[in-house]
Image: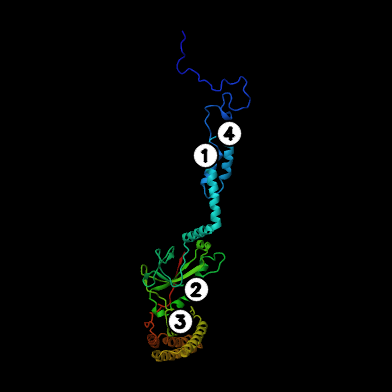
């Protein structure tokens, strides 16, 4: 009696028949090996170039970098039987798409727009401020020290500062903080009266500040010294514009203020040393004031004033003639006492009653500034 073999021990029938006794050498698919000579049951490896192609294809900023590895990977997979064909195809396709996108970007000029946007962002990140003459703004960080950002606001309302001049420096290497500060002090002081011609209308606590390029902002093209007015008291804001120039004044007012400011500029040039230490320098300066007074007297006499201002201006010219004579005598004084005698008489005619009357007739500020108020200092901030 025959006994059937146990369940599971029966060998499956090979549909292709038994293998030949002498299988061809080097022919895949025969013997105990599967396709490509790989033993049955061996794990299939992933082609490394296929993985690399996909990674490079995903990195859009490297267009085309994954195309060549992807094609090579497909060729290797076809020969070796490795997996990763889908990865290689995906990497090659993404790289091809990246190439197309970059061609479109280059042909439409979008690269330049992106680059300009990057540069603008870099400038903003490095505190390059762009302000124009007449702008009013708030400075969240204050005007003292480093000013990183500003918010433009209407001049009619409350604000921290008002720009009265912008000085553009030449290109080249960064000149250094000290050099830029010296230039700002020189330029801003000289330009303040061109913007605020009526110095009597300037609030007592207003000072001159400036925003300067920093070494970092200079690299991004910042060449502007921004001159501005601000209040010296912390937390106190300006109200209304301080601008009094030909854009806000009539012709009569401009002529009068031009002569007054020219005289003030001459008076500000008084030597630092006292007459006791350098009488010669003071006598030379007195002679310069005498000459400037002569020029301004001629300017006032040569202008056609409105009827209501003719008498006040004639009286002012008369006082200026007296002052001019005293400056002439001071310029030839033989000793310090004589010099001071004429000096005091000459200064007595400056901003006296005749000046107040003339200002009232021209609808200008008529309250003389307190002593020292019109000798404004300067403060700096850096961007």
Measured Cα–Cα span from mark 3 to mark 2: 16 Å
Residue 192, by quadrant, is bottom left
Q: Pointer 1: residues within 10 angstroms few (<14), some, or many (20+)?
A: some
Q: Which residue is drawn at 52% across and 43% down?
A: 90
Residue count near mark 4 (Cα–Cα under 10 Å), binned few <14, some 14–19, many ≥20:
some
The mark that comes first in sequence, 2 or 1, is: 1
The quarter of the displayed image where residue 310 is located? bottom left
Badge 3 marks a residue whose secondary structure is helix
Q: Taking 362 as reference, is 179 left or right?
A: right
Dot placed on the residue nearer the N-terminal end, 4 or 1: 4
Q: Which residue lies furthest to the top in this view?
A: 1
- Residue for badge 1: 86
Closer to the N terminus: mark 3 or mark 2? 2
- Estimate how packed mark 3 is, as few (under 14), some (14 to 19) or many (20 or more) residues with alpha carbons within 10 Å: some
Q: Earlier in the sequence, mark 4 or mark 3?
A: 4
Q: Label 3, on which residue? A: 261
- Residue 206 in the figure: left or right of residue 56: left
Label 4–label 3 contact, CB within 8 A: no
Residue 218: image location, x then y, percent: 52, 63
122 up-or-down from 95: above or below: below
Distance between the alpha carbons at the discs numbered 4 and 3: 93 Å
Circle 4 residue: 80
Q: Which of marks 1 and 3 is nearer the N terminus?
A: 1
Front position among marks 2 and 1: 1
Q: Which is closer to the viewer, label 2 or label 4?
A: 4
Mark 1 or 3, which is nearer the eye?
1
Residue 136: % across, % down: 41, 70
Q: Give the CA separation, mark 1 to mark 3.
A: 83 Å
- Residue 307, by quadrant, is bottom left
Q: Name the residue under label 2.
A: 187
């Amino acid at each position: 009696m025959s006994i059937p073999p146990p369940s599971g021990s029966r060998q499956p029938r090979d549909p292709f028949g038994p293998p030949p006794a002498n299988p061809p050498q080097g022919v895949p698919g025969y013997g105990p090996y599967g396709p490509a000579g790989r033993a049955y049951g061996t794990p299939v490896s992933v082609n490394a170039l296929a993985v690399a192609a996909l990674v490079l294809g995903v990195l859009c900023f490297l267009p085309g970098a994954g195309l060549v590895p992807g094609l090579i990977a497909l060729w290797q997979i076809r020969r070796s039987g490795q997996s990763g064909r889908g990865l290689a195809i995906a990497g090659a396709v993404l790289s091809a798409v990246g190439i197309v996108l970059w061609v479109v970007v280059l042909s439409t000029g979008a690269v330049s727009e992106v680059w300009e946007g990057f540069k603008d962002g870099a400038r903003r990140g490095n505190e390059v401020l762009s302000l124009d003459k007449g702008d009013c703004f708030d400075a969240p960080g204050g005007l003292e020290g480093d000013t990183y950002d500003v918010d433009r606001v209407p001049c009619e309302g409350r604000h921290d500062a008002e720009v009265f001049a912008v000085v553009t420096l030449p290109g080249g290497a960064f000149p250094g903080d000290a050099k830029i500060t010296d230039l700002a002090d020189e330029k801003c002081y000289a330009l303040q009266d061109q913007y605020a011609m009526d110095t009597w209308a300037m609030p007592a606590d207003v000072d001159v500040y400036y925003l300067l390029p920093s070494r970092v902002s200079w690299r991004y093209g910042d060449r502007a010294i921004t001159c501005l007015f601000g209040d010296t008291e912390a937390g106190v804001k300006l109200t209304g514009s301080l601008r009094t120039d030909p854009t806000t004044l009539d012709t009569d007012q401009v002529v009068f203020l031009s002569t007054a400011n020219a005289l003030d500029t001459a008076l500000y040039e008084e030597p630092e040393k006292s007459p006791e230490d350098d009488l010669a320098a003071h006598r030379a300066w007195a002679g310069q004031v005498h000459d400037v007074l002569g020029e301004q007297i001629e300017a006032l006499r040569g202008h056609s004033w409105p009827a209501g201002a003719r008498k006040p201006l004639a009286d002012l010219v008369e006082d200026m003639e007296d002052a001019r004579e005293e400056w002439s005598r001071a310029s030839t004084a033989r000793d310090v006492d004589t010099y001071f005698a004429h000096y005091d008489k000459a200064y007595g005619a400056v901003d006296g009653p005749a000046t107040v009357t003339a200002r009232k007739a021209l609808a200008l500020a008529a309250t003389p500034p307190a002593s020292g108020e019109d000798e404004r200092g300067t403060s700096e901030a850096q961007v």
